[in-house]
C-alpha cells in the first residue's frame, strides 16, 4: 500500500509484485513507502500499519521495542547497514545475516541475504531492499565485508585489515560491502553524507 503518486508509483508496485522475494522501498530512515506481496509473510498483515513505518517496526524485529533505529542493536542491523550503504550511493549491497523477529509471541530466527540498491524516482531517492532466503546457495560461499570508504576488509575475528594484506592471503576472496566500525561512527554518527 502506498499513496497514489502517479504512474511511476504504479509501475514500481507492479515491478515489486513480480519479484518472488520479499521486497520493500524505504526512505533514508528505513520507513517503508511500498512493499510487494511476498513481503507480507514478514510484515504485519495490515497494509495500513506497514506504510510509512520503519522497517524493523513493521517486521516486528525483536530489537524494535523502543522503536526501529533506537536500540544499541540497531547500530549493527544488517538491513540498516545495507540501506546506509545504498544511501551513500553504492549501487548494490548484499549482506548475509540472521534476523530475529517476533510473531504471535514467539521469536524466530530467519537466515537471509539483504540486498539494497538506490532507486531514483521523480521525488527523490528511495532504497530497494530485497530479502532472499539463504537456502538458495548464497550461504555456501564465504563473503568478507569490505568497507567501501576506507577499503579495509573484515576478517573472521571481526577486526578490519587493509585490502592488500587480506588479498595477499586470499586473492580469490568474495567481497561484499559493509561500513567498518570507524567509518560508521564517523559518518553515521553525525548524519553526514559521504564526500
Image (cartoon, rainbow, N blue to C red):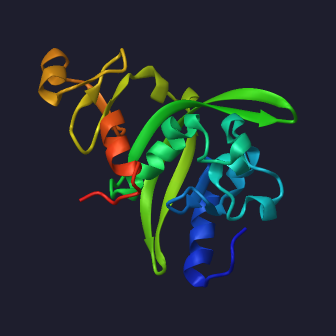
* Left or right: residue 79 compared with residue 51: left
Q: Identify the image quadrant of the N terminus.
A: bottom right
Which residue shows up at 31% across the image and 37% down it? Answer: 182
Q: Vertically, is 125 above or below 182?
A: below
Which residue shows up at 59% across the image and 83% down it? Answer: 7
Residue at the front extreme?
A: 190
Which residue shows up at 12% across the image and 19% down it? Answer: 168
Foreground residue, 41 or 189? 189
Residue 141: which quarter of the image? Answer: top left
* Left or right: residue 126 compared with residue 146: right
Q: Vertically, is 82 above or below 117?
A: above
Residue 185 drawn at (x, y percent)? 37, 42
Q: Identify the image quadrant of the C terminus.
A: bottom left
Residue 88: which quarter of the image? Answer: bottom left
Residue 93 drawn at (x, y percent)? 39, 45
Which residue shows up at 70% across the image and 49% down it? Answer: 57
* Left or right: residue 6 compared with residue 143: right
Amino acid at each position: 500500500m502506498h499513496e497514489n503518486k502517479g504512474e511511476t508509483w504504479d509501475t514500481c508496485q507492479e515491478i515489486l509484485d513480480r519479484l518472488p522475494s520479499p521486497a520493500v522501498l524505504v526512505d533514508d530512515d528505513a520507513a517503508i513507502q511500498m512493499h510487494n506481496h511476498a513481503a507480507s509473510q514478514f510484515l504485519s498483515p495490515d497494509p495500513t500499519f506497514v506504510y510509512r513505518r520503519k522497517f524493523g517496526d513493521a517486521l516486528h524485529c525483536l530489537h524494535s521495542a523502543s522503536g526501529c533505529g533506537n536500540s544499541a542493536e540497531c547500530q549493527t542491523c544488517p538491513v540498516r547497514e545495507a540501506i546506509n550503504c545504498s544511501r551513500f550511493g553504492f549501487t548494490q549491497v548484499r549482506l548475509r545475516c540472521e534476523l530475529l523477529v517476533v510473531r504471535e509471541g514467539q521469536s524466530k530466527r530467519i537466515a537471509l541475504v539483504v540486498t539494497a540498491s538506490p532507486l531514483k524516482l521523480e521525488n527523490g531517492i528511495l532504497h530497494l531492499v530485497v530479502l532472499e532466503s539463504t537456502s538458495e546457495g548464497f550461504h555456501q560461499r564465504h563473503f568478507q565485508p569490505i568497507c567501501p570508504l576506507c577499503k579495509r576488509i573484515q576478517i573472521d575475528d571481526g577486526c578490519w585489515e587493509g585490502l592488500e594484506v587480506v588479498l595477499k592471503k586470499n586473492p580469490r576472496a568474495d567481497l561484499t560491502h559493509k561500513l567498518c566500525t570507524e567509518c560508521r561512527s564517523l559518518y553515521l554518527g553525525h548524519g553526514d553524507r559521504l564526500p
